[in-house]
Image: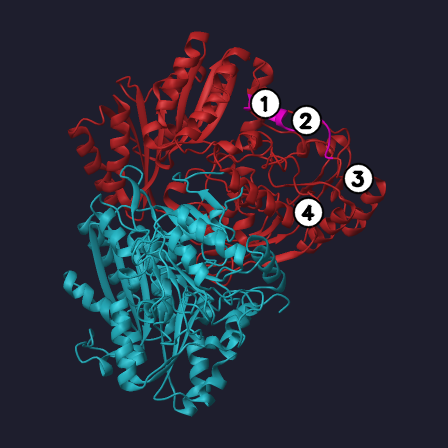
Chain colours: A cyan, B red
Amino acid sequence: MAHWTLRQQRSLLRASRAHSAIVHAASGLRSVSATPDARLAKWDDDDVAHFRRVLRDRPDAVLTDAHDTAPFTIDWVQKSKARGSHHVVLKPKTTHEVAQILQHCHARALPVVPQGGNTGLVGGSVPVFDEIVLSLSAMNAVVNFDAISGVLVCEAGCVLEQLDSFVAKHGYMMPLDLGAKGSCQIGGNVSTNAGGLRLLRYGSLHGTVLGVEAVLADGTIVDCLSTMRKDNTGYDLKQLFIGSEGTLGVVTKVSILTPPRSSSVNVAFLGCEDFGAVQKILIDAKKHLGEVLSAVEFMDRQSLSLVLEQQAWHSDPLETACPFYVLLETAGSNSKHDMEKLEAFLGHAMGIGTVVDGTVAQDATQARKLFAIREDIGIALVSRGYVYKYDVSLPMSQFYQIAEKTRERVTPLGADVICYGHLGDSNVHLNVSTLAHDEKVFQQLEPWVFEFTSKYRGSISAEHGIGTHKPPYLHLSKSETAIQLMQQLKRMMDPKGILNPYKVLPPDGK
Amino acid sequence: MAHWTLRQQRSLLRASRAHSAIVHAASGLRSVSATPDARLAKWDDDDVAHFRRVLRDRPDAVLTDAHDTAPFTIDWVQKSKARGSHHVVLKPKTTHEVAQILQHCHARALPVVPQGGNTGLVGGSVPVFDEIVLSLSAMNAVVNFDAISGVLVCEAGCVLEQLDSFVAKHGYMMPLDLGAKGSCQIGGNVSTNAGGLRLLRYGSLHGTVLGVEAVLADGTIVDCLSTMRKDNTGYDLKQLFIGSEGTLGVVTKVSILTPPRSSSVNVAFLGCEDFGAVQKILIDAKKHLGEVLSAVEFMDRQSLSLVLEQQAWHSDPLETACPFYVLLETAGSNSKHDMEKLEAFLGHAMGIGTVVDGTVAQDATQARKLFAIREDIGIALVSRGYVYKYDVSLPMSQFYQIAEKTRERVTPLGADVICYGHLGDSNVHLNVSTLAHDEKVFQQLEPWVFEFTSKYRGSISAEHGIGTHKPPYLHLSKSETAIQLMQQLKRMMDPKGILNPYKVLPPDGK
């Protein structure tokens, strides 16, 4: 999975300290200039006094103590601290307060990092220097839920898992699910266009989000909080805020369509002899399981072996060791029908030989155990040593080729390649594992991985975003004219560049 | 349904001539200034000569004869002709040609109307004065189809129905379906964010379109033609072109995710005693039919009576006359399972009394007959006399209230209110029928209908768009700051205002 819960991140942090293992997140901060943008000002005591007034002197609404600000300024994945030496974190409770804060910051040219649960993986939610952290966590109320239409309206700081529990009471579910659900916030999900496990079935947030209320860089409140599924009245402005990582505006409220909750869930773990069979399973599963198919995850034998080696509590679910595995999930409204479909599909797949061994979970506990193997690969990688992580989209014919080619490049250097991902979404998680950091391995990987992805018109960031890690590589997924148009948009909507600086776009003219 | 096929439109046109019936499309062109925008130039013979060179002197690539240009300049719904006296229609075959045309038009400040199948309902696809028509109809090739992922890449001029037939050969279907499918083009669908019958199941084009290639006002080609389902690399620029009705750029190619085709389709026609029961059916159908539910359409008794009165070939499908009807469709991969689900749901609904009478189609012919009743209401309205048409989204609690309130306002004036729509999408088609145009009725309707919609945060245009008909009412669905941001976007992307002028947005400062 793409994200970890805060608890997992913390244990991961402990593990990494114990093992001296550091996740090498691609180019890291090296793309960011060594000094702050000269156009931007630094906040001072007068600003803090102003913020305290705006936030009505509420305790905990303005944090300046280093101990208090640390959870908001440390990147959990990189374990890197912002380079600045003193920080301020603001926690408004209303959209009006957000607007007042931004109005002031805009007038003073003070840089601002909008932040949700701080669970991102590309350095997008933490300050690079001394930017002001604008945490939405205190705006966490459900505004409205319509049990007939399934439309939920809530504030940006609502935690995803809590929203899922809330709508579950009415028979609905959130259209997205990710490992970080216990910590991530819906405003952050929307701002980063979070993907995750349910995208295959329910599509991206560009489709499921019906409305957004956002505050622009200058404090203007833009209310596009439609609750209507169909609304063709002018330009669909909410799309500007979905996936722009807080660089075009701060999302303060979200209206989202929630699908009915499935009463029946089945999980199957299948072994295949070659990647052609993996592809065939995807096609056949889409055809036979159609409307009940809810996840098609992939891992290679190297992924499973690593989990078994690092995590003694897991066992191989199959008797036959296979080079490739597919984890299928169905979710539907009738367990008898779903199981019949799954059995018919499996019979077909075993008949034509695409599946050589497989198991179907008999209950929810077994299902969770099978899914846990897939979910634990990321942690197993970190506990083994050093890991170079890539999150790319590729056409099916290159989905596993990138792992094979990478293996040719790094195996002679003693590195292992672990490949898994969201097969149903063409989203590859390519990981190169070494016992310690190795510059020679890195040289074999970058920019080669991004160039390979670009060559096949893939995406150099499938679901994690660009953040501070990938602006120098953006041109490998987007054309020059597209990047110019993005920069035009940024200048128009944030002329002083105060919103989440150093993120997403390469500097103008580059 | 929202659209008609060209054939239907033509017969509708004949019918309307025979009956002197004219569809009164809200405010019509009255919102447009009486004279052309003074910033824009008029094309001359030198321009035409230039276009002929760009289009390599292909016969039929440059049309100037009035007979030839008429199908491109007449609005099929309003039957109104553009006010200009001489027209030119350009039919480029490549994106590069589109770019050359726009580069020239931009340099000369010549206004351009991008056009697909010209099946829109709000006057958005025809010239108001002498704007150049840029028809994409000659760009109609399928570029690529990936039978594993179901991703189709094609040129803008491909006709929707032909694309649906093409992907059907591989077991897939287009994620959208509308009555105009035999004429409408995918580029126009994307530019207008067409809704239609499959939106309930597969979501809007903002989610299913994966990529767009577009040409900006100045001729710059923006290639965002991703074929990846997940692509978080910078701002999602394609969204700017989805639903902006050709005012921000000309869509030249589209990449779209097509879902697997359902092998089993069932249709049920149900009668209810009150609107509370209609709402309950929607909730229960979502819960019980979940993943196989593919359409939930609504009509009132007045709609059915009108069809029966105007179209002798239809008959009442039920023995009991009911005030409200729901038309349900399921689409799935297993006919036995789907029928079991439908029967269980119907048993439940009749048990608790939400359904008082109902019928289930026994074969495809019966299913088509039931759907035809719903589809033919629009034509029945036109053949009866004069009709005031509104296409709005409203929360469920106001979905039918708008019809009741409208009835109170116009029944004393002798007008009938006919209400139907896409219940599952909260999309109401409110129609007021009179034997002839009646200004008193109109005064009772506008701006009241839009104000009522606005009061409940509905959308004054659910799926038809704004075009030339609704710019003066945009403020009733969108906030002032949102409209200002739209105008800023328009100025940034089309500083001379050459792309589809007089459409979508009110003039700056209004």
Q: Circle 2 sits on which residue?
A: B81
Disc 2 residue crowd, few under 14, some 14–19, many 20+, Cα 10 Å: some
Q: Nearer the viewer, mark 2 or mark 1?
A: 2
| Classed neighbour count for the residue bearing mark 1: other residues with Cα under 10 Å, few (<14), some (14–19), many (≥20) | many
Residue A8 location (% of width, % of height):
26, 71
Under circle 3, the secondary element is loop
Q: Earlier in the sequence, mark 3 or mark 1?
A: 1
Q: Tell me the chain of label 4.
A: B
Spatial distance from mark 3 to mark 1, Cα to Cα?
31 Å
- Nearest to the eye among marks 2 and 4: give it: 4
* A314 displayed left or right of B46: left
Dots 3 and 2: beta carbons under 8 Å? Answer: no
Q: Is residue B240 visible?
A: yes
Give me the residue at 47% from left, 44% from top: A222
On whether residue B34 falls in the magenta region, the answer is yes
> Where in the figure is residue B284, as x and y percent of width and height?
23, 37
- Please name the amino acid that badge 2 sits on: Lys
Q: Is residue A22 left or right of residue A40?
A: left
Q: Are marks 1 and 4 in contact (CB under 8 Å)?
A: no
Identify the residue position indicated by label 3 in the image: B43
Mark 1 — residue?
Answer: B13
Circle 4 packing at 10 Å, graded few (<14), some (14-19), many (20+), is: some
